């Protein structure tokens, strides 16, 4: 597969020798994050069937230019489809073009096909019959997501905010104008309509397409529910994708006469930044996006953004993209990457997709550090959320070129054989031991243990192990202070932070108030992280009104302010002075926080720039 850029959109071209090309129109926002890895594999399947395939990010989504708040979003998304069709034809010379869309992507694909004409086949997978229905579903999703502790309800006048993404009032109004039942022209001569198995078939859609003169084949998408949980569960049944590949490969036309054009190096020019996709690692199988300031290079450390859980390199709610571009304007270069088995990077072995806390991922992160050094960045700060936090810590421990780390809501501090997000939830790895302790103060609980009740016995074993870890941690701290020697085992996390501080590594450790990971924090670092509160060069911040993945936009904004302040404070004095002048001239930020502090849910007024 080959990275490609067109009309401000980033995409991947999957070459093949057939004469029928495919443009994949993915779902929107959170659904795209969930499906990204499976969508990539789908494109590979289509290419293996002889179908040249282009998948891409709509304008304002993923790695493409723009953002949620830009005007004309719906028009831009449809124009992205049009531009993708044009680029596919130019690159491959295919005789036919097929559009394949999923969810809102199906709505956009059909709308674009009806506009541009010349689309030979159309596949609609679990389509949203109208943009209005999609907006209604998104509003319902937003209401179902519980607000984190201390958070304020997003202002409905600003639009619909769900899981880090925003539909502005203008976008909602434009979505209301999308309706597949009101298509003015036939989108394609042949249509494959795959409906959700858990919902009634969209009333009238197949008949409307037939009335427009299309030959319609209707079926169900049997693994829709599994696909919607793809990042949680790892590899899942994708029989629906195989059905589409088989249908598209029927009566394949001969390849066009035009040879594939060798695409120029993709470069995305942005306000204040320039982005380039990069392939790195020993065999070039790892993927990342390098974001550099558009002006002169600086001597500041580069930022290395690693995967948030199993989410690909754009980050939860597209946070890494937004933050990287904002920091580029301050002179910071960055690389956001996918480790093996996640996002757009190759897998290690069959069946290892979407595993997190995998010890093999550390080598991928260090390969990214190598790549940054090859581009002149001798120092870097690793930024990781959830499982990415464990990668940041372990990378800092393993490589002296990592001179800073930003660790956000780490669920664990150690790497192992790898686990899926779903298995973590089942195992309740983040559960606070306090709940178990309260259960075992009840006589009935101990009677259950004595009766060999397996669940209660498991709880007791868990508590004994946790108590042993806490004891070992306390003993390890004492031994380290007395003998200057670090102990091994799960209780030595504070000693690791101390070792990094002694090496001069700056650490920003951020927790969302009330987060599920606080139980693990207290287990490893002591109640309220008391065992690291005296560690130099470590700033411990509790973020009010923030969910685990910082998808609430107000919390993300405050985190970005905090990150900017931390990075600028970590620079040499002369660098800090220049950066402060640039930053505070725009009135950004909210001052440098103390090492152990709480960031309030509402920004504080800033009287003067930090010294």
Image (cartoon, rainbow, N blue to C red):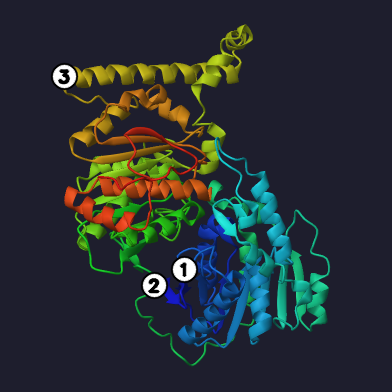
Distance from Cα at disc 1 to Cα at disc 3: 54 Å
Q: Earlier in the sequence, mark 2 or mark 1?
A: 1
Tell me the quarter of the image containing the C terminus: top left
Residue denoted by label 2: 268
Say what secondary structure mark 3 lies in. Answer: helix
Residue 483 numbered tag: 3
Say what secondary structure mark 2 lies in. Answer: strand
Q: Position of residue 594 (x, y in %)?
A: 32, 35
Name the residue: 32% across, 21% down.
Answer: 473
**How many residues crowd around disc 3 within 10 Å: few (fewer than 14), some, or many (20 or more)?**
few
Say above or below: 224 vs 175: above
Q: Position of residue 34 (x, y in %)?
A: 55, 54
Q: Quadrant of residue 502?
A: top left
Q: Quadrant of residue 335?
A: bottom left
Distance from Cα at disc 2 to Cα at disc 3: 54 Å
Residue denoted by label 1: 64
Work out whether residue 509 or residue 231 is closer to the camera in this orientation and state it. 509
């Amino acid at each position: 597969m080959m990275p490609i850029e067109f009309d401000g959109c980033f995409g991947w071209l999957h070459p093949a020798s057939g004469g029928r090309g495919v443009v994949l129109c993915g779902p929107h926002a959170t659904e795209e994050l969930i499906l990204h890895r499976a969508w990539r594999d789908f494109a590979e399947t289509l290419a293996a069937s002889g179908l040249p395939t282009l998948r891409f990010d709509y304008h304002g989504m993923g790695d493409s230019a723009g953002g949620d708040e830009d005007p004309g979003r719906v028009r831009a998304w449809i124009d992205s489809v049009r531009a993708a069709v044009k680029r596919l034809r130019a690159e491959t010379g295919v005789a036919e073009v097929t559009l394949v869309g999923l969810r809102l992507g199906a709505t956009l694909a059909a709308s674009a096909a009806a506009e541009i004409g010349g689309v030979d086949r159309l596949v609609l997978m679990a389509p949203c019959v109208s943009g209005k229905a999609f907006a209604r579903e998104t509003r319902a999703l937003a209401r179902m997501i519980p607000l984190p502790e201390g958070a304020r309800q997003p202002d409905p006048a600003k639009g619909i905010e769900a899981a880090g993404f925003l539909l502005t009032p203008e976008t909602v109004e434009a979505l209301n104008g999308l309706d597949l039942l009101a298509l003015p022209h036939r989108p394609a001569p042949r249509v494959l309509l795959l409906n959700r198995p858990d919902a009634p078939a969209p009333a009238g859609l197949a008949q409307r397409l037939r009335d427009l003169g299309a030959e319609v084949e209707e079926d169900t998408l049997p693994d829709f529910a599994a696909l919607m949980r793809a990042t949680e569960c790892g590899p899942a049944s994708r029989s629906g994708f195989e059905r589409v590949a088989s249908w598209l490969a029927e009566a394949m036309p001969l390849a066009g006469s035009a040879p594939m054009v060798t695409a120029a190096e993709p470069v995305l020019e942005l306000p204040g930044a320039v982005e380039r996709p990069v392939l790195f690692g020993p065999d070039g199988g790892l993927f990342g996006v390098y974001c550099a300031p558009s002006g002169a290079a600086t001597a500041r450390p580069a930022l290395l953004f690693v995967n948030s859980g199993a989410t690909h390199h754009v980050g939860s709610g597209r946070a890494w993209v937004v933050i990287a571009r904002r920091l580029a304007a301050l002179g910071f270069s960055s690389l956001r990457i996918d480790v093996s088995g996640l996002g757009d990077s190759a897998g290690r072995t069959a069946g290892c997709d979407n595993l997190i806390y995998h010890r093999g991922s550390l080598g991928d992160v260090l390969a990214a550090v190598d790549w940054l050094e090859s581009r002149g960045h001798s120092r870097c700060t690793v930024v990781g959320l959830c499982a990415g936090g464990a990668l940041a810590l372990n990378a800092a421990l393993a490589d002296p070129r990592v001179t800073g780390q930003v660790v956000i809501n780490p669920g664990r501090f150690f790497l192992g054989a790898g686990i899926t997000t779903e298995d973590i939830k089942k195992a309740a790895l983040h559960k606070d031991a306090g709940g178990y302790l309260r259960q075992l103060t009840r006589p009935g609980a101990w009677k259950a243990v004595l009766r060999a009740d397996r669940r209660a016995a498991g709880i007791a074993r868990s508590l004994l192990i946790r108590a042993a870890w806490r004891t070992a941690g306390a003993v390890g701290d004492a031994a380290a202070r007395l003998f200057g020697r670090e102990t091994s085992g799960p209780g030595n996390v504070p000693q690791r932070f101390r070792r990094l501080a002694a090496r001069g590594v700056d650490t920003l450790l951020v927790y969302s108030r009330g987060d599920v990971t606080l139980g693990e924090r207290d287990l490893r670092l002591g109640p309220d992280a008391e065992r690291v509160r005296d560690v130099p060069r470590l700033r411990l911040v509790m973020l009010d009104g923030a969910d685990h993945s910082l998808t609430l936009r107000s919390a993300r904004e405050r985190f970005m302010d905090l990150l900017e302040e931390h990075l600028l404070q970590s620079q040499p004095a002369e660098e800090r002075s220049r950066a402060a002048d640039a930053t505070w001239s725009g009135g950004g930020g909210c001052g440098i926080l103390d090492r152990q502090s709480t960031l309030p849910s509402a920004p504080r007024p800033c009287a003067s720039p930090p010294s």
